[in-house]
Image (cartoon, grey):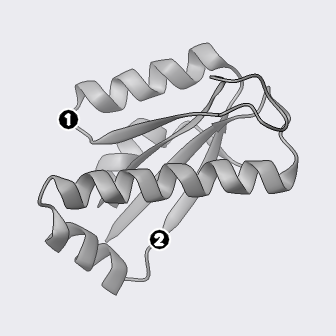
Amino acid sequence: MYKQAIVIRSDLKLPKGKLAVQVAHASVENVIKLLNKGESSLVKDWRDEGMKKVVLKVDSFDELIKKFNEAKSRGFLVSLIKDAGKTVVEPGTVTCFAIGPDKEEKIDEITKDLKLV
């Protein structure tokens, strides 16, 4: 089974709509990166299984960066999202990142201690 995980900062207390948009940015950005890297079969397999996604939370910027760096160091393709700052947060605010899609058990090694949004 495949899935994608999006990890978002809860300390920003984003309104639901803003949170949804940031998650969408991360999801799409990482899929585009995978396709550009030639991983279309992985994306196809994930899509055929229903495109499972989870949205998880961390308490701070530091915790987000720690998880991001852990995923990157383990070889995952990841996308860090910085907001344009036109509505709720300051320009350049890091809001979330995406991991995958990839094998569910591999992603769980990094995200197993995080809670769902």
Quadrant of the rendered structure where residue 74 is? top left
Element under label 1?
Answer: loop
Q: In the visual, does 8 lie left or right of 68?
A: right
Asked if one can make out residue 17 in the rendered structure from this viewpoint, the answer is: yes
Residue 16 in which image quadrant: bottom right
Residue plotted at (78% across, 36% down) = 86
Q: Mark 2 or mark 1: name the one nearer the start of the chain.
A: 2
Q: Position of residue 99 (x, y in %)?
A: 39, 46
Give above or below for 6 relative to 69: below
Query: As displayed, is residue 61 above or below residue 20?
Result: above
Picture coordinates of residue 116, whole percent (x, y): 67, 50
Q: Along the line of sight, which residue is nearer the eye, 112 or 67?
A: 67
Query: Is residue 105 rendered to the left or right of residue 80?
Result: left
Amino acid marked by disc 1: Gly
Residue at numbered disc 1: 75
> Which residue is most to the top?
62
Residue for point 83% across, 38% down: 87
Query: Circle 2 sits on which residue?
Result: 52
* The image quarter in which residue 41 lies: bottom left
Spatial CA distance of label 2 from label 1 is: 20 Å
Give the amino acid type for the residue marked by disc 2 in the picture. Lys
Q: Quadrant of the N terminus?
A: bottom left
Label 1 CA crowd tier, 10 Å (few <14, some 14–19, many 20+): few
User: Picture coordinates of residue 81 (x, y %)?
Assistant: 53, 36
Report the front residue among 91 and 112: 91
Q: Which mark is residue 89?
A: none
Instruction: Determine the residue positioned at 58% across, 37% down.
Output: 96
**Is there CB contact under 8 Å for labels 2 and 1?**
no
Q: Residues within 10 Å of mark 2 (few under 14, many from 20)?
A: some
Residue sitting at 66 percent across and 34 percent down?
84
Kindly tell me whether residue 100 is visible in this rendering: no
For numbered disc 2, what is the local secondary structure? loop
